[in-house]
Image (spheres, rainbow, N blue to C red):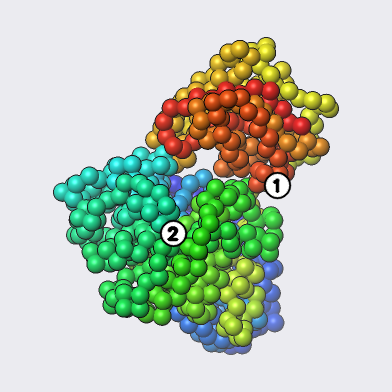
Amino acid sequence: MKSEHRSGVRSLWILVAAAAGFVGALATLPVPDSAAAPGQEAPEESFAIVDVTLFDGESFGRGQDVWIEDGRVRALGPRLRLPADLPRVDGRGHTLLPGFIDGHVHTFGGTLGDAVRFGVTSVLDQFTDPALPAGARTARDEIAPTTEADLFSAGMLATAPGGHGTQFGLAVEPLTDPANAAAWVRARKEEGSDWIKIVSEDGGAYRGEIPSLDRETIGALIAAAHAEDLLAVVHVSALQPALDAVALGADGLVHVWIDAAISEDDARRFAEAGVFVVPTLSVIAGMFGDSTGLRILAETDASLLSPMQRQTLSDPSLLRAGAGAEVALENVRRLHTAGVRIVAGTDAPNPGTGTGISMHGELRLLAAAGLGSAGVLASATSGAADAFGIPGRGRITEGYVADLVLVRGNIESDAEGDVARTTDIVTIWKDGYPVVREAAAGTFSPEIAPAPEGAILVDFEDGIDSGFGFGWQVTTDAMNGGASTAELAVEDGALVVSGETKVGFAFPWAGAIWFPGPQPMQAVDFSGRSVLRFRTRGDGRSYTVMLFGGGAAATVPPMAPFVAGPEWAVIEIPLDSFATADPSIIAGLAFVAQAPLGSFAFELDDVEIR
């Protein structure tokens, strides 16, 4: 229904006025002379896009008109009889698509805004704090201006104690007995989970070893989900767990496996079972050194990217060697050939991906697996909506929400059905309202004070006072509702940082932060410097330096790792290692412990930016 405002995760904002009205009788020509060209002020809420190539979620049609009324599709077809005063957009030479649905994301911070700026108007979250999707229900049921994608989510995932999903810091209720499955699923339904996600992951495909749910418990969870009228999807990374999940009655698999290619017979059995697969080729390709997101980044207007998108796209922390990406692509090819439904999903914002932008890379990877233009686009629209039971989205048809993406060119008429055109976006409409695509933040004030000339050295000889800027403070995830702790002390002319990272926030951290400006998070311009240098020693674990730039304190900061071994060592980190628009603009440098959870202790000395 119409609403004047949104609550929960939506922000209230006013967009541009509708285009000028038309004069005269009912229009019978598909493109009146007064139709607005794409790229001009986009009409909102009630308007028509005329004479456009339409992909309705399943197939293409040329010369189509689409009438939007009150944020929903009222009618579509060739040469519609439209009210004379209805604003129009001239769609000639363009393709109109349903808003994309990303079938595998993880939501926090500004990811919902990052998604919608790249045409991803709905996201299917496969694990997040259960409070987040509960708060998003009101927003996704309203028709109103918004800066964010709609959120549907599994909420908490089902995993073993110490299993995959427990390492991120979110509170997880693990399972140890199949007898507890029914109660566990009921609790998730009461929390607002839209489906149930189950983890079948022992780390073997990635040459690790972690606890995993046993086959009996997985089967009990699938049965319990179905008893509550919920879908059951299973996280897998290896072929055998995928075969087991399908045999146990899973509705879908979220990830394709990377250890072995599926046989044609098994692929046919998947199709006969009606299972869908969300391959997440984007994160797999990035993991093995071929990030499609980075390639698309080179084609993209820099103003569209948030600092968080830049940081996650460039994060190399999951990089590994091997042929896993090729195996994954071959599995998708065989599944598609057998008739298995493929759902586009990116696993953003994991390292090597960027929320929203990586969807366009995912489409290119699915095209490489042989899906064809209509199949690729359906995997990110109607196929995703049908697989997960998402109402009113994924198609351009009467009564559906007007989530629309208008791109230049005719995708259907291209010799190879070039889905790369999806990045050439003219206008995005969410709930019938045009999306303002510029990313918030990321630019810096020219009035930022420069750092003084000469060496800037923090040696702690005079105590915790750095001698430059506001000084050193404790920093932990408590500012985001987490439970991690830290303490600072100076001993023998060095800063001692100790504490504990704990469950409570999606990305737990604790440690020390240095504010080089006169006030906390007041940026300083270190132009001309290129390296962060410091001495450290500690308990032998890996730590992280976070760089907070001007105006970016609300986003995930760019990071660089270091190890604090038992003996003093000099660490040098080039500032350009931090994936940010200008790494010389520094509002804070945090030296923190993250995963694994638990106690930590390290020392810092002779910190300088040179």
x and y percentages locating residue 147 in the rendered image: 55, 54
Vertical side of 558 occupied by 360: above or below:
below
Toward the front, the furthest residue is 567
Q: Quadrant of the C terminus?
A: top right
Earlier sequence position, callout 2 versus callout 1 = 2
Task: Look at 39% across and 35% down and name the residue there.
Answer: 503
x and y percentages locating residue 288 in the rendered image: 54, 59
x and y percentages locating residue 294 in the rendered image: 63, 59
Label 1 sits on what residue type?
Answer: Ala
Classify 10 Å Cα crowding around label 2: few (below 14), some (14-19), many (20 and above).
many
Residue designated by label 2: 104
Task: Look at 32% across and 70% down and name the residue there.
Answer: 275
Residue 171 left/right relative to 430: left
Spatial CA span between label 2 and label 1? 27 Å
**Observer-nearest residue: 591 or 93?**
591
Label 2 sits on what residue type?
Answer: His
State whether residue 64 appears in this view. yes
Task: Look at 31% across and 61% down and name the residue there.
Answer: 241
> Which label number is shown at residue 581?
1
x and y percentages locating residue 337 in the rendered image: 41, 80
